[in-house]
Amino acid sequence: MPPSRSLRRSAALLTGVLLLGGLTTAPAVADVQAAAAATAAVRVNQVGYLPDGPKRATVVTTAAQSLTWQLRNASGTVVASGSTVPHGADTPSGQSLQVADFSSYRETGAGYVLAVDGSSSVPFDIRADLYDALRSDSMAFFHHQRSGIAIDASLVGSAYARPAGHLGVAPNKGDVSVPCQATVCDYTQDVRGGWYDAGDHGKYVVNGGISAWLMVSSFERAKRAGQEQAVGDSTLRVPERGNGTPDVLDEARWELDFLMRMQVPEGRPYAGMAFHKVHDAAWTGMPMRPDQDPQARELHRPSTAATLNLAAAAAQCARVFRPYDSAYADRCLSAARRAWTAAQANPALYAPASDSTGGGAYDDTRVTDEFYWAAAELYATTGESAYRDAVTSSPWHTSSDAFSAYGFGWADTAALGRLTLATVPNGLPATDVARVRASVTSAADGHLSRMAAQGYAVPTPADGYFWGSNGNIADNAIVMAVAGELTGDTRYRTGALEAMDYLLGRNALGRSYVTGYGETSAQNQHHRVWAHQLDASLPHPPAGSLAGGANSGLQDPVAQEKLAGCAPAACYIDDIGSYSTNEVAINWNAPLAWLAAYAAERPSGGGEPPTAACAVTYTAGSVWSTGFTATVTVRNTGPTAVDGWQLTWDWSAGQRVTSAWNATVAQNGTTVTARDAGWNRSIAPGATASFGFQGSHTGANPAPTAFTLNGGTCA
C-alpha cells in the first residue's frame, strides 16, 4: 500500500507537539549515526533464538570477502564456527553487510556471543521458552491501555497503577455521556471502556476493530493448533482471570464492548452505523494521565469504514466466544448483522481527512476491502448465502492485490478476509478455498523473497519504512505463519521468526524496538503516562511495548531536526517527542502479541488446519416424482472430538434442499452446506451425528459422491 495510507496521524500533529514542553535534547543525526556505528557490528536478536529455529546474524563490515564467525558460550568457549556470506550494499540501511548462519547449533544456554572479525554481539540465549515472557507482556500492553477501569498495582506493579480514566470523575468530562461534534447528533452516548489507541487518549473504531480482530485471531489460531491452553484462562495479568474464559478473549472483550457501544442506537439517524471515533476536543499536553484529562470529549460522525470494522470484529466474536459465553456471542452477532445492514444502506459515508483536531483522522475513502472482510467474517460465522454472495461477488475475492508487500492495516483489510476464509471451515467450493489458500502462500513467498534480498531479512520492500513500519513487518510475519500452518512448509515459520529477529535487534540500528527486551531497547516511546523522559517520577513504557519503528517520512519535529539524511531503515530515534518513529499503538502491539504467542509455541507439526477424520453415510428415504428425503450420518473416525461441524457436498443433477432437521442446511448453486444445530456440535471419537432433509429434483437423483467435514475430505 502507498505510505500515505499507513499514517495514523495527520500533519496536524505538528500543532499538538508544541504542547509537549520540557523535551530533553536528542542527539543530532551525526551523533545518532556515530552511536549506531559504535554499537556491536554483529547484529543479533538480542533476546536470543529458539533451539530448532533459524539463527542468523547480520554483520556490518566493509570487507568484501567471507569472514570467520565463532559462537562462544558464556564461559568463552567456542562451540561452533563457520564463514559469513557477503551481502554487500544494503539499500534500506545504507550499510555494507554480511550474514552469519549458525542455525545448525541447537544446544541451549544463556550468555552466548557471536564474534566476527574482532567484533562481538551482545549476549543472547538459546532456549525453548524464549518467547514465553514476551507472549505475556505484549498482551499485557492492552490491559495497560484500558480506558474506564482502574489499573491495579496487584496486576501491573505500583509504577504503572493508575485510577480509571474518562469515567466522568472530575476533572474528567468522561465517556459515559459523550455528546457529538456540532451537527453530528443531538444526543449523548455511553462509550466507556475500550483501549486508548496509542500515546494519547483517543479511541478509534477502525484501529480498534483490526486490533481486537488480531487478538481474537491469535486465540483462534492457537486453538486450531491445539495450543490454546497457553493463552487460556489464568494465563495473563487481567482482572477477569479465573472466570472460565481464555484471558486473551477477556482482554479482547474489553475492546469489543466499546466497539458495540459506538453503534448508533435504533431510532436515530444512521442507526446501526458506528461512530468513527471519540477523543478530546483538542490535543492534550504531555504528560497527562487519563484520569487527569480535563477536556471535553466528542463523538465524531459515523463512517462506513468504522461500521464494517464493527461488523467484522463482532462477527468473529460470535464465532470464537460461543463455546465460552453463548449469550455474548449472540449479542456480538446481532451487532454485526445490524452494522452490515447499515453499511449496505450507507456505503460511502467517509471520515473526512480534515477531522484531525485532538485526534487522528483515520480517513479512508476506499471501503470495498472492509466490505469484503466483514462479509468473510459473517459468512464464516453463519454460513448464510447472503454473506457468501457478498464474499464471492467482491472484486477482492479474486484480486491479486488483497495481500500487499507493505502489509495489511487499518485502511487495508482485504487480507484479513482472505486469512479467515483460508483457515476457518466454510462452505466455499473446494477449488475456491484452494485458491484463497494459494493466495496466502503466494503472499508469503513474496515476503520470503524480499527477505532474501536484504541483509537484515526484513519482510518489507526497501521503501517500506513508513509510519508504523514495525507493525506492518509483524503483520507480514503473520501471513508467513499462516502459510506455514496451511502447508507444513517450515521455511514460512523460519521467515516469521526472522521477522521477530528484526524487531528484537537484528536491524540497522542494533536496537530492540520492544521495551524491556534486549540489551539495547526502546525506552522513551511517545506516551502521555509512560513519560519518564519528561518527568522522572513517571515510568518508562512497560516491557512488551513496541515502538512504531523506522519512518523515512520524518513526520514530527524531533525526527525532522535530528534524523535528516538518515537511511530509511535507520530513521528512528528513541525520543518521546518523535511520535512518527517512537509512538506505541494498539494496531502495532496486536500483531506483536499474535507473533509472540505463535513463536512461543512448541510446534508438534505443520500441515493443514486440524480437520476431523470422518466417514459419511448417505441414506435415501422416500422418493417421488419431484421430491425425496435423505438422512446423512457423520462418523468421527479421528482421535479427538469434533467441536462444531460443517459438512459440504455438491449435487450433480440440480437437486435442491427444501427443508432440514437436526442441522442448518443452506445451498448456493450446486453446493450444499450443513452446519450443526448447536446441541449436536460435539462428535466424540467413534461417535456419530445425523440429520435429515427433504429435497426436490427434476429427473435423475444420484447420491453425492464426496463430502468434506470442516474442510477435510471424508471417506
Image (cartoon, rainbow, N blue to C red):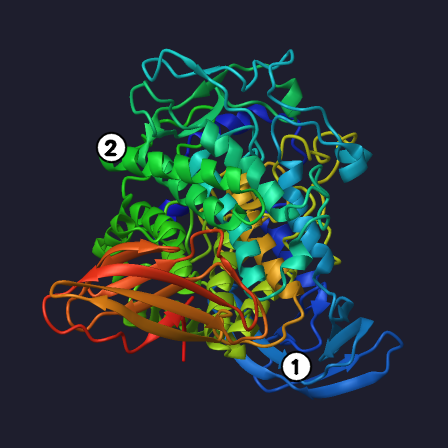
Vertical position of residue 627 compared to residue 282: above or below: below
- For image coordinates 46% across by 76% down, the residue present is 487
The amino acid at mark 1 is: Ser
Q: Give x and y (percent) for residue 515.
A: 69, 49
Considering depth in this image, is 627 or 5 the residue closer to the camera? 627
Q: What's the mark number on residue 103?
A: 1
SS at circle 2: loop
Vertical position of residue 33 compared to residue 487: above or below: above
Vertical position of residue 590 compared to residue 689: above or below: above
- For image coordinates 32% across by 49% down, the residue present is 375
Location of the N terminus by quadrant is bottom left
Q: Is residue 363 visible?
A: no
- For image coordinates 48% across by 47% down, the residue present is 213
- For image coordinates 67% across by 58% down, the residue present is 229
Q: Give x and y (percent) for residue 541.
A: 69, 41
Considering depth in this image, is 342 or 35 the residue closer to the camera? 342
The residue singled out by tag 2 in the image is: 346
